[in-house]
């Protein structure tokens, strides 16, 4: 039986419903009503719910606040049956969780009156019940969610607002127990938590520049489309070789080069490897929007590479994310650069991997290469590459290394040297947790650091060119600076990395 990738993200769970009054199965049963008080909201006064839009909710403070947690939402809307009432209501069926509970009790209804510019949140069943008996032997006390000003009608909230132009809303809510045993021995309402949540509704304004292009190509020329509405201003772009740092983004924004005033498609000349298209735009409050698309250029360049035979690729990066996938090894074609000895690439190393495990597919449009720069054998660099793999649930899978990420972030070589790989006795290997996996369609801007066994790497073909060259030129050392730059004439009194016969050492030149 084929094994599959395990679920990677541990979702933040909704409040756990452990028990309820009168039943132990309340977690699978919705209450009779979501709205608690008819005088706050009577279904008979409103039209039927209609699908309206989508959006994103971000928990700013309170119940999930401070965790940076957000997720996509679908939103329904209905209107008052009273022609003189301009208010409308929106319903978020999937309010606190990525998946709604059975019965749909994890929803929130929010009312907005455009005439009064006022938000109102009626009291609603939160789906929580106390699970532990109190001093009087009572449990199953209900938990409710309501608006701050609904709970405290004599107060106001400066936190709540709804921007009708931007479609941005911030709400102020309370979760409380009703009927809980208080310190004075009476039963009443007890506020459990206070929350501030931000909701961004789609379809109002869009200040992003949507960059549309193939993310993996085998040609140095490709078409990139910049698509945007008439909402943003100050739109500009730049093509960058490699990853982009925050400093680079700031520089692009400051330079304001390549301005755009309308959607356009254009041809770009790419460098081999990773290319990053950056587009900058601004909203009416001068808030900056940064949109990035990484394009992997993997031309065959047959005249620049020479096949050196079959090697053995040991995989502990993608497999490190899976469940019981082991540490598989595959025979792969290996090529070496004709112009840079020690620069190797594996040809479609993940093709056999995709056939071994279910839920994975491999892009068949062209070859995919994983590059190892072992021109300095003791400092092997693994650059970010597209594996060609796609998981049914997680999307496209990309490979990177700590050394590469830190180098592109501006770190000095001495700072990331501990993460570089090593070529010794025809085996390229990397330190534990120094190889990473990116899943941008699943979680943006995140890297899962793998290779926990330290097994990820490549056994070169036995007749690789480095062995041949070193055997023929045993007494001809090659000198490199400590930053990895080759030196034709070493200087007396300097320290170099010296490569002899396929081995390297740090030496003081006299």
Image: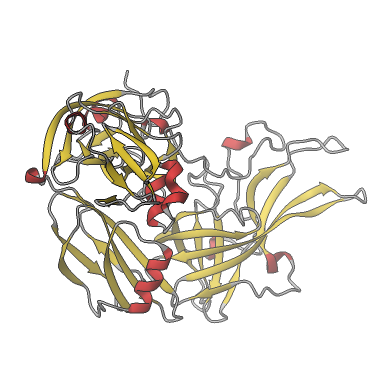
Along the viewing direction, whichever of 319 and 244 lies nearer the viewer:
244
Left or right of 197 on screen, residue 239: left
Q: x, y percentage for residue 440?
A: 36, 49
Q: How is the image coloured?
A: secondary structure
List the single residue furthest toward the left: 303
> Horizontally, is 454 left or right of 399 in the view?
right
Residue 216 image offset from top left, x and y in percent: 21, 49
User: Which residue is the extreme one toward the front?
Assistant: 510
Picture mark count? 0
Q: Nearer the viewer, residue 116 or 299?
A: 299
Look at the picture and state if 167 lies above or below 493: below
Tell me if 413 is positioned left or right of 261 in this view: right
Residue 228 seen in the current view: no
Q: Nearer the viewer, residue 390 or 116?
A: 390
Looking at the image, is 296 positioned above or below residue 431? Answer: below
Q: Residue drawn 42% across and 29% down?
A: 454
Give the answer, above or below, for where 385 lies relative to 352.
below
Work out which residue is located at the far top of the displayed protein and give it.
1
Which of the image's four quarters has the N terminus? top left
**Residue shown at 39% from the left, 22% from the top:** 326
**In which image quadrant can residue 345 be found?**
top left
Quarter of the view holding residue 315: top left
């Amino acid at each position: 039986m084929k094994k599959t990738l395990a679920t990677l993200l541990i979702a933040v769970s909704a409040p756990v419903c452990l028990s309820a009054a009168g039943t132990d199965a309340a977690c699978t049963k919705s209450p009779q009503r979501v709205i608690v008080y008819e005088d706050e909201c009577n279904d008979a006064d409103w039209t039927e719910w209609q699908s309206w839009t989508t959006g994103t909710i971000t928990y700013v403070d309170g119940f999930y606040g401070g965790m940076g947690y957000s997720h996509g939402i679908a939103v329904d809307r209905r209107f008052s049956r009273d022609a003189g009432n301009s208010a409308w209501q929106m319903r978020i069926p999937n309010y606190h969780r990525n998946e709604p509970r059975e019965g749909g009790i994890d929803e929130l209804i929010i009312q907005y009156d455009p005439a009064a510019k006022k938000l109102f949140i009626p009291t609603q069943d939160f789906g929580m019940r106390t699970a532990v008996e109190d001093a009087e032997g009572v449990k199953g006390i209900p938990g409710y969610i309501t608006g701050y000003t609904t709970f405290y009608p004599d107060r106001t909230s400066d936190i709540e607002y709804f921007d009708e132009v931007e479609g941005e809303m911030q709400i102020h809510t309370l979760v409380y127990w009703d009927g809980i045993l208080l310190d004075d021995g009476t039963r009443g309402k007890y506020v459990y938590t206070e929350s501030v949540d931000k909701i961004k509704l789609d379809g109002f304004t869009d200040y992003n520049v949507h960059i549309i292009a193939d993310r993996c190509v085998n040609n140095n020329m490709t078409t990139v489309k910049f698509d945007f509405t008439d909402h943003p201003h100050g739109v500009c772009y730049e093509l960058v070789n490699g990853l982009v740092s925050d400093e680079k983004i700031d520089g692009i924004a400051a330079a304001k080069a390549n301005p755009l005033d309308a959607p356009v498609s254009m041809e770009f000349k790419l460098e081999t490897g990773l290319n990053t298209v950056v587009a900058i735009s601004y909203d009416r409050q001068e808030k900056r929007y940064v949109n990035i698309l990484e394009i992997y250029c993997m031309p065959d360049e047959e005249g620049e590479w020479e096949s050196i035979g079959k090697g053995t690729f040991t995989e502990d990066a993608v497999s490190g994310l899976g469940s019981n996938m082991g540490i598989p090894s595959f025979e792969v074609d290996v090529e070496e650069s004709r112009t840079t000895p020690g620069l190797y690439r594996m040809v479609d190393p993940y093709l056999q991997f995709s056939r071994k495990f279910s839920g994975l597919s491999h892009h068949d449009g062209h070859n995919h290469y994983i590059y190892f720069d072992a021109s300095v054998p003791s400092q092997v660099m693994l650059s970010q590459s597209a594996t060609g793999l796609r998981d049914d649930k997680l999307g496209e899978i990309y490979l990177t290394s700590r050394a590469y990420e830190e180098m592109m972030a501006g770190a000095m070589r001495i700072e990331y040297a501990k993460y570089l790989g090593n070529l010794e006795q025809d085996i390229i290997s990397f330190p534990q947790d120094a190889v990473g996996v990116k899943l941008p369609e699943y979680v943006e801007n995140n890297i899962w650091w793998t290779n926990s066994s330290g097994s990820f790497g490549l056994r070169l073909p036995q007749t690789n060119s480095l062995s041949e060259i070193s055997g023929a030129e045993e007494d001809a050392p090659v000198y490199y600076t400590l930053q990895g730059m080759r030196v034709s004439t070493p200087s007396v009194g300097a320290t170099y990395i010296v490569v002899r016969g396929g081995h390297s050492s740090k030496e003081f030149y006299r």
